[in-house]
Image (spheres, rainbow, N blue to C red):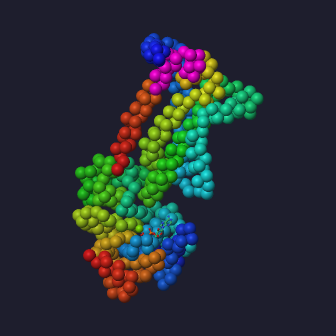
Amino acid sequence: MDYILNGFVEAFRLIFSFDPEIIQIVLLSLFVSFSSTLYGTLIGVPLGILLGINNFRGKKVVSRFLYTFMSFPPVIIGLFTALFLARSGPFGQLQLMYTPTAMIIAQTILVTPVIMGIVFNNASTSGYEVVQTGKTLGAQRWNILILLVLELKGVIMIALVTGFGRAISEVGAVMIVGGNIRGFTRVMTTFIAMNNNMGQYSVSIAMGLILMTISFITNSVLYHFIIGDHNEYRD
Amino acid sequence: MNIETRNIVKTYQEKTVLNLTGDYRELLFESEKIHGIIGPNGSGKTTLMKIMAGLITPTAGDVLYNGQPLCQDIFSEMTYSTHTPTLFSRSVYENIAYPLKIRKREQNDIHQTVSQLLEEFEITDIKNQSARRLSGGESQKTALARALSFSPRVLFLDEPTANIDPKSIQIIEAALKKRNREEGLTIIIITHNLSQAFRICTHLTFLDQGSCLFSDTPEKIMAATHPTIDEFISFNRF
Ligand SMILES: Nc1ncnc2c1ncn2[C@@H]1O[C@H](COP(=O)(O)OP(=O)(O)O)[C@@H](O)[C@H]1O
Ligand SMILES: [Mg+2]
């Protein structure tokens, strides 16, 4: 049991030593996951709204696919991305395998369905009423899109937080396409997995604490400023 | 704007919910009048109104607006409000200003129009409140003020005074009569309140099980001897 307690003591020492390698790993994790959440948003929000507010044949099938993709295991997505990016794969000449770019691509594939699914679900229900109301008040296509984004603001933020949470905490996809290369593609989760394998529990715990703190802070900030606000408007 | 329906049928999954092909296959909602649509629950009133407002398409039949089929210009001169309005998550003031803002009206213009509407509907004191936290009467008045802000030519109302206090009902009825008298606004209103129908409507259309049983002046409807109408009137007299 001692190693757990020692682990925590060592963890705090590590955190407050501001080790440049640790800082670099944290920053890379944030950069990769923020980037993929951003791309996931740019793709997932408009598509989710568009699919949600329109009625078309096969909408049920689309939503079933979407919900399946929302819970796809990260390793599978990592594997899928690797097949395309590997040297002999269709995008092999771009030489993206084992780079931060590859990690961003894999995580974008991971979070886009999450963001899209949440937005789609809400746009299908409350979005329809908003569109109808906007139309009866003379809103044109463009006005309606702006109106929808504003009305779904809270939901979009929840989607972002959820997407970011999934990105920053996954290990399977970044491990496969990033390769956990020291100083280049090593992120918090792959660092933890590696150190745990080597029996270095204290550094694992230290990084685990940092990861949890970061998740907690991003969530609190978003909840406080946006979702809290949004709930106030609820009946 | 005259609105005429011709042989309207609406079917949902093989179930015909509206079938205006009998004696009343042509209904005329005359310009600059206040028309009431009455009848039991599920008789197709909302369906007919949404078809006339261009929000849903009929399975068969046509609606003509001054003799023309629906187009964007006509659609943008009509508006629609219900007793469960969808207000936007912004202030009461901003809700009412919305139709004017998207029409790029002058800031001063907008302020003046909205202020007048706030006063008319006696909701000035809640103008900065979020529209998602209003009582039934307040949200119905806000929705109506928003619908009237851009001076539409045709106003469709689906039970606009259901479940609200008598004072608010009075304010809403006064506003409707005033717009009709002074601006020639054509109003088509669904109501369960028969005395309200008699107070404000010049023409009533009675629907039952998707069919029209009567479409004439309120006096003629009172004198009608159809059992369904008799029953409806005796239940809703007060
Ligand atoms: N989208 C829909 N899908 C299936 N049935 C519907 C739909 N909308 C309305 N109906 C049915 O059409 C009938 C008439 O409804 P409605 O026009 O709302 O009646 P009213 O407004 O007179 O109470 C009802 O039986 C209702 O269940
Ligand atoms: Mg109805």
Left or right placement of residue A160 versus residue A232 in this view: right
Q: Is residue A197 depicted above or below A218 in this figure?
A: above
Residue at position x 35%, y 79% in the image: B232
Q: Is residue B178 left or right of residue B56?
A: left
Instruction: Please say if B172 is above or below A170.
Output: below
Quadrant in the rendering for residue A75:
top right
Q: x, y (%) of residue B166?
A: 24, 65
Q: Which residue corresponds to the image point at 45% horizontal and 49% vertical from the top-left?
A: A147
Instruction: Estimate the x, y position of residue B229 in percent, counting from the top left.
Output: 37, 82
Q: Depth check: give the residue in front, A231 or B20.
A: A231
On the image, the x and y values in percent for residue B144 come to: 34, 60
Image: magenta residue range: A192-212
Q: Is residue B107 visible?
A: no
Q: Is residue B129 left or right of residue A55?
A: left
Establish if B229 lies above or below B162.
below
Q: Quadrant of residue B163?
A: bottom left
Which residue lies most toward the right here? Answer: A88
Outermost residue toward the front in this view: A1
Instruction: Tell me the chief SS of the magenta region.
Output: helix
